[in-house]
Amino acid sequence: MTDLLYLDDLTVGQRFLSGTHQLDEAQIKAFAGQFDPQPFHLDDEAAKGTLFGGLAASGWHTAAVTMKLLVGGGAPIAGGIIGGGGEIKWPAPTRPGDLLQVESEIVEIVPSKSRPDRGMVTMRSQTKNQNGQVVQEFAAKLVVPRRPAKPEA
Amino acid sequence: MTDLLYLDDLTVGQRFLSGTHQLDEAQIKAFAGQFDPQPFHLDDEAAKGTLFGGLAASGWHTAAVTMKLLVGGGAPIAGGIIGGGGEIKWPAPTRPGDLLQVESEIVEIVPSKSRPDRGMVTMRSQTKNQNGQVVQEFAAKLVVPRRPAKPEA
C-alpha cells in the first residue's frame, strides 16, 4: 500500500495514476434508472436520435466512478479525499465498455491561515477512456491535513 | 405534466422548484459502498472523529439525487437535461434523514452562433435540506434546443 500523503508531502506538479474501472451497459442503466432516468442513458435505440448518438453514461455516473478510482488509491491523501467542490467538465460521452482511469495532478497548495493543521489543495483529475480520450475533468478543492507532530520521546 | 420548455421559452431569472427526496442511512451507505467508500460516508462512529463530525453522504450522492430531482420535473427542459459541466460546491454536509429539494434559476442564455437550432443556458441549482440550508450549489451549462418550426399547412 502506498504511504498516505500529508500537506507537507505534496508539491505542485505531483501526479497520481489510478487503477481502472470498466463500465458496461448494465451499470450505466442501473445508475441512470436510479438517478438520471433520461432516454439517452437508458435505451440504446432512443439514444441514437439524441445529441449523444448512442447510449452514454450519466455524467454523474462518470463522476462517481472517478471518485471510486481516486478513493481506491488514485489519490493517496491522508485523512481521505474531502472536497468542498470544484469545476467539472464532460468533454466526451462515456460509453458501454469504456475502461476508465484517472490521472491527477496537484496544481495549487494553500496552507490555511486560520487553521495551521491543514491546507487547501487543488487537484486536477482527468478521467480517460481506453483511447486516451478525456471523458471528465474535475478540478477539486481538497482539505488536506498537515502531518501531526511526533510526540517527544 | 408541465409543458417542456424550449430555448425560446426561457428567460433570465426564471425559477423552478423540484419535488423532494428523503435520504436515509441505508441509501448513504449503499452509494458510498459502491462509489466513495470512506469512513465518514460508511460508519457513524468512525465519522465522529473526522471533519464531518458524523455520518454524511458523499457529495457525489447529493449530486446524483439533485439530478434525479431535476429530471423528475425540477427543470422541465425540452430535449432533456444535457450538461457539459459546471461549478459545483458542497457548503454543508448532507445527513441521514435530510429531505432534499432543488431550487433552480436561469442565469444566462446564449444562443449558439454555429448551431441556430440550440443555445447554451446556465442554470444555477441550489439543493436545500428541510431547514433551508444549502447542501449543494451547481451552476450547470446546459444545451437547450430551440422550438422546432411548425410545418406549413
Image (cartoon, coloured by chain):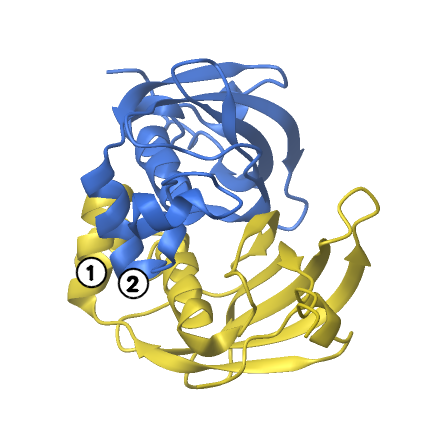
Chain colours: A blue, B yellow
Q: Residue at x 65, y 59 (%)?
A: B145
Which is nearer the N-term, disc 2 or disc 1? Answer: 1
Q: Residue at x 38, y 58 (%)?
A: A38
**Position of residue B133 in the picture relative to residue B64 (left or right):** right
Q: Answer few, some or many: residues within 10 Å of disc 1's Cα (few below 14, many 20 plus, some between 14 and 19).
A: some
**Position of residue A70 in the picture relative to residue A122 (left or right):** left
| Residue B110: x %, y % from top left | 80, 57
| Residue B65: x %, y % from top left | 37, 64
Place residue B130 in its image quadrant.
bottom left
Compare residues A122 and B54 and report the one nearer the observer: A122
Residue B54: numbered disc: 2
Residue furthest front as drawn: B153
Chain under numbered label 1? B
**Amino acid, disc 2:** Gly
Q: Is residue B87 above or below residue A62?
A: below
Residue B38 appears in the rendering: no
Q: Which residue is mark 1?
A: B44
Q: Quadrant of the N terminus of chain B?
A: bottom left
Chain under numbered label 2? B
Place residue A13 in its image quadrant.
top right
Q: Element type at marker 1?
A: helix
Q: Is residue B127 above or below residue A132?
A: below
Cα distance between the residues tagged 2 and 1: 6 Å
Q: Residue at x 19, y 56 (%)?
A: B29
| Residue B76: x %, y % from top left | 53, 74
Q: Is residue A49 above or below residue B125?
A: above
